[in-house]
Image (cartoon, rainbow, N blue to C red):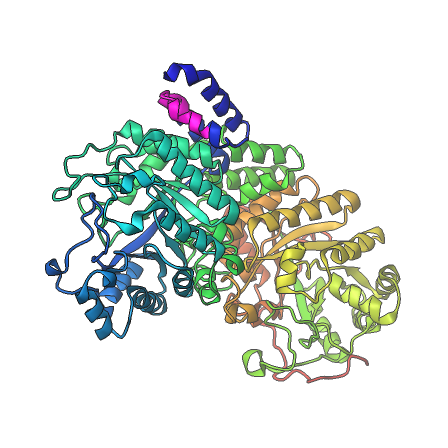
Amino acid sequence: MASQHIDPVREVITQVLRGSRPDASESLLLGACDDLPLLKGAAAAVRDQGHPALMTYSPKVFIPLTRLCRNVCHYCTFATAPRHLPHAFMGADEVLAIARAGAESGCHEALFTLGDKPELRYSSARQELEELGHTSTLSYLAEMARLVLDETGLLPHVNAGVMEPDELLALRHVSISQGLMLESSSSRLCRKGASHHGSPDKEPSVRLKTIADAGKLNIPFTSGILIGIGETRSERIESLLALRDMNDEYGHLQEIIIQNFRRKPGTRMADAPEPTLEDLCWTIAVARLIFGARSNIQAPPNLSPGALNALIESGINDWGGVSPVTPDHVNPEAPWPQLRVLEKAAADAGKQLLPRLAIYPDYAVRPETWFDEALHTPVLRRIDASGYPRTDRWSPGAKAEIPAFRVRPASRYKVGSTVYRTAMSAADGKRLEERDITRLFEARGPDQEVLCAAADDLRASVVGETVSYIIACNINYTNICGFKCRFCAFAKGGSAESLRGPAYDLPLTEIQARTLDARQRGAVEVCLQGGIHPRYTGQTYIDICRAIKKVQPDIHIHAFSPLEIWQGAHTLGVSIEELLCELKAAGLGTLPGTAAEILDEEVRQLICPDKLTTEQWLEVMRTAHGLGVKSTATIMFGHLEQPVHWARHLLLLRDLQVETGGFTEFVPLPFVHMESPMYRRGNARRGPTFREAVLMHTVARLVLHPHITNIQTSWAKMGRQGALFCLQAGANDFGGTLMAESISRAAGASHGQELLPRDMEALIESIGRKAQQRTTLYQPIEGGSEAETGVWNEPESAPLMGSATL
């Protein structure tokens, strides 16, 4: 019989491999296919299109809040009669003890599992709930989930059974995700003698309604099927299709679990046959083909000991929750595998094992859609830009230990890997696509090492082994600003004086004095930036340049971001070109590429909605370059954005550089979070991870090649040792000595405000590279100009609201 369907099945699989999705009739055709190698090979290929490098799992603790249940599933040993339990419900102390042990062990998830509404069956449950101050199990569950979240920071995931919309919504306020296994859409299993008989909550229509209601409420949801409980292969496929249809409508099914029945002594199904490994692999493969590349397909590893490789080969990309603290209370006979075993299975398949939250990354990075506002900050504090958990305590500007990081692979390059091929394409000067760049930013483990090595090799071939730096002085002439950038800890408005010190506005005489002092200490550049003072006009910026040139004609003025240029032109009623010409005549040398932040309007509307737009920033730079005024280019990253936004940003810079050739360097500026207003309000991540910060330099080296040849690292934000890592992963410039740098310090950075040239050179030489002092335009300064020792002495109290004219 099966042979009659082989050709149609092969056609379905061929179409799936080409990117199409099987409809219901085509999916049902798969039920007749017994060619397991064919199905597994196709499923793995489809999986690798969406999950090419990672196998994930959720480090969790298992909290069985109650083992009482009103259902009597014929295969379950979790549900227990009241006479066998000392209490109907776990107490708050018991719950917290488990959660705290999980937090100490590095878990992220608190999995609450419980029987369905036991108070509807047992008087003892009703009585104990009353003593606890609740009328329902779900009300008590909500209290315990909130307690765990507030006391330990673990993110609750609740498997609370069949619920009404108001009950789902109440739990949404205190949990990051919820779950309910469909098990099967076949009502036949609810008939007398079948596995779900006597279990009203296992009626498929009831369970499907709960799953659909969760979708309407935008609740990230876990569901799946249980195989081997009397269903047919066609019924499995029909169950999967029912879930797929629901996900098509709401997009809330973050994972599909394929769970194999395990018989247990003392149950009515104690003698029932368990599904074979082949049957489990067949179901996983069919699920992958039905759901497609991006879906998350999971199989519990503890239920298939010794068969982990077979499960990966069948198309899964996730192991589900694995606990270092608690057993699987639903399957207590099946211990969790050690992480090293999961790591080896992933490595055998050419993948890296990576922890995740209870909520999957695609949902974690969209908090406004997928979880309650009360959960936004706890999630943001835990994740990186891709939505995975942070794995170390490092943040830009913080005095924290550099995490273990390798910029060279332990063995030879994985020359056949997608990452290697993409890196080599970039090294050949080809313009990468947004999708390819995003994947480079996602590189981890061996792929990350290959990428860093490729970028460093490219750096060596383009600019050699010399690391350049500049003796420069930063003059931040005012911290008063009328703009409301939500990330900025430097600018002063009308509040928060106690947080960031008093407002100031330096008079021109003070700017001149600082310029003279900087020049006497060897500076070849003054970098001037500040807030957008409401009283400043374009003439203010012209006057500043003239004042500096009056006392020090030979110093280079690197000043005024595109925001100052745009605002200055507007205040004078002139064009950008006209103002730039005036500034150039007054002595302006180059523009800093700040105010770029992230060149993507989706992000800018969140972090700096009243600032100039992406197109306006590009227009200023295009105009400046056309007038012979070169500039740097920057990115400020690690707050709310995602890797796709980094990719778009780099492509915009690359394309403009191809057009104008006016960028001298690219400077990644990791977000320093400590005093940032949006971080303090709980609306931002705590900067990029160390991996992300290094990779920004790495990927930029590749993506911007051959058009922007200088990649600078910021020691003030990366720290001295962090900056050295960047120099071995694509960067070639150590930036400036930063006399009087104050913007990073205002944000909370603790790496100092100045690095003397001799110290900078010693750092550079410590990694076997040669230090070279340079000009702003990257011309070498032979012999150098050693700055005087000592630290910049700022006035005890800068003039408040002072005049900006002589």
Residue 536's image quarter? Answer: bottom right
Q: In this orientation, does residue 312 appear?
A: no
Left or right position of 93 against 249: left
- In magenta segment, residue 105: no
Residue 672, x across and y down, in percent:
54, 64
Residue 555, x across and y down, in percent:
76, 64
Q: Is residue 61 above or below residue 791?
A: above
Tell me which residue sits at (25%, 65%) in the image.
Answer: 95
Residue 539, x across and y down, in percent:
84, 72
- In this view, the residue in front, 356 or 276, is 276
- In this view, the residue in front, 176 or 58, is 176
Tell me which residue sits at (18%, 66%) in the image.
Answer: 123
Q: In this orientation, does residue 298 appear?
A: yes
Left or right position of 180 against 711: left
Where's the C terminus, which quadrant?
Answer: bottom right
Tell me which residue sits at (59%, 38%) in the image.
Answer: 458
Residue 425, x across and y down, in percent:
61, 32
Specify start and end residues of the magenta stretch as a single range: 27-39
- In this view, the residue in front, 644 or 743, is 644
Task: Please state the total of marks drawn on the protein image.
Answer: 0
> What secondary structure prevails in the magenta region?
helix
Tell which residue pokes out farthest to the front in this image.
192
Q: Is residue 765 above or below residue 587?
A: above
Where's the N terminus, which quadrant?
Answer: top left
Left or right position of 157 against 578: left
- In this view, the residue in front, 134 or 729, is 134
Q: Is residue 706 above or below residue 313?
A: below
Tell me which residue sits at (56%, 49%) in the image.
Answer: 643
